[in-house]
Image (tube, rainbow, N blue to C red):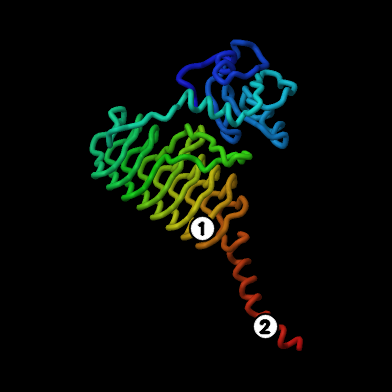
Amino acid sequence: MKFPKTHSLKEIAEIIGSEFVGENNFPVMGMNEIHVVEPGDIVFVDHPKYYDKALQSAATIVLINKQVDCPEGKALLISDDPFRDFNKLTNHFRPFVYSNVSISSSAQIGEGTIIQPNCFVGNNVKIGKNSLIHANVSIYDHCVIGDNVVIQAGTILGADAFYYKKRPEGFDQLLSGGRVVIEDNVGIGALCTIDRGVSGDTTIGAGTKIDNQVHVGHDTVIGKKCLIAAQTGIAGCVIIEDEVTLWGQVGTTSGITIGTKAVIMGQTGVTKSVDGGKTYFGTPIEESREKLKQLANIKRIPEIIEKLK
């Protein structure tokens, strides 16, 4: 998430009430999660396991819960609770703004686009030309939808990320200030849920077609011309490259990559990153030919036991 204007390190520290290490006027242009940070971004880290990763990331401002040596060319925000203060920044720069109308006056809707009854279109949504939004679709604030997109009834774009920190009193939610971006010529089935990024974008690439009842987690990036069948669940921060096929009831873990033109057979659990251009099956996932051989051999176990007797 980029801020409307560049702020100084001192200004950001005052918003969250933290100490800082660096020049007062060190430029701060946005905030993001570690896998998508750029120079000028703030990234937060609150566990020693990830200190080095955050400090060595592309982010030039690190919100951290320990006084450490500041890498050259970077700045630190020292906080007793970086998770809490990252939420403060999200709330400051992209606060929740309630709506009392079905289609916000700030929404931009392109020529030829049809929005069926009982849809909700939130603040600052952009929808391109000649798209069709069927009944009972909810499009949360700041979502971006391209040209010639079809969204079937009951789908929800832009719900909050499933991202929590466990506290003694319960679970504390990381606020979502990101977006959902749907590129041109995408088709989305009925009753799908596509969560927005925490501070970045959840993206569906041009020409991709998604069946009914598919879930896409926060900050996931799906490439161009993919096919995703019903009841598939894609976790957060997944990268699905171009022309991938996911058949029905596929499930993935978070933070993995599925390579270009991979085919994932139905009911497969994608527990790790996989190369493109191959077909996969099973849980844990393996190339389908090898997995099917294993299953055939398992069926022979009773026969083998009889022979051994």
User: Where, quadrant-wise, is the C terminus in this rendering?
Assistant: bottom right
Asked if 307 appears above or below 258 in the picture, the reply is below
Asked if 49 appears above or below 190 in the picture, the reply is above
Judge from the rendering whether residue 154 lies leftward or rightward of residue 256; answer left or right: left
At horizontal 36% and vertical 38% (from top left) the residue drawn is 145
Q: Badge 1: how crowded within 10 Å, few (<14), some, or many (20+)? A: many
Residue type at numbered disc 2: Pro
At horizontal 35% and vertical 44% (from top left) the residue drawn is 185
Q: Are marks 1 and 2 in contact (CB under 8 Å)?
A: no
Q: Badge 2: how crowded within 10 Å, few (<14), some, or many (20+)? A: few
Q: Position of residue 259 (x, y in %)?
A: 56, 49
At horizontal 41% and vertical 54% (from top left) the residue drawn is 213
Write down the residue under mark 1.
Answer: 250
Asked if 216 appears above or below 284 in the picture, the reply is above
What secondary structure is found at the residue carrying circle 2?
A: helix
**Nearer to me, 183 or 225:** 183
What secondary structure is found at the residue carrying circle 1?
A: loop
**Nearer to me, 206 or 201:** 201
Which disc, if any, is residue 122? none
Q: Position of residue 226 (x, y in %)?
A: 45, 50
For marks 1 and 2 on the same chain, the one whose residue lies earlier in the sequence: 1
Q: CA distance from mark 1 to mark 2?
A: 30 Å
How many numbered discs?
2
**Residue at the farthest front position:** 169
Quarter of the image for residue 21 reads top right
Q: Position of residue 26 (x, y in %)?
A: 60, 14
At horizontal 30% and vertical 31% (from top left) the residue drawn is 104
**Nearer to me, 42 or 299:** 42
Q: Position of residue 16 (x, y in %)?
A: 57, 21
Write down the residue under mark 2.
Answer: 302
Residue type at numbered disc 1: Val
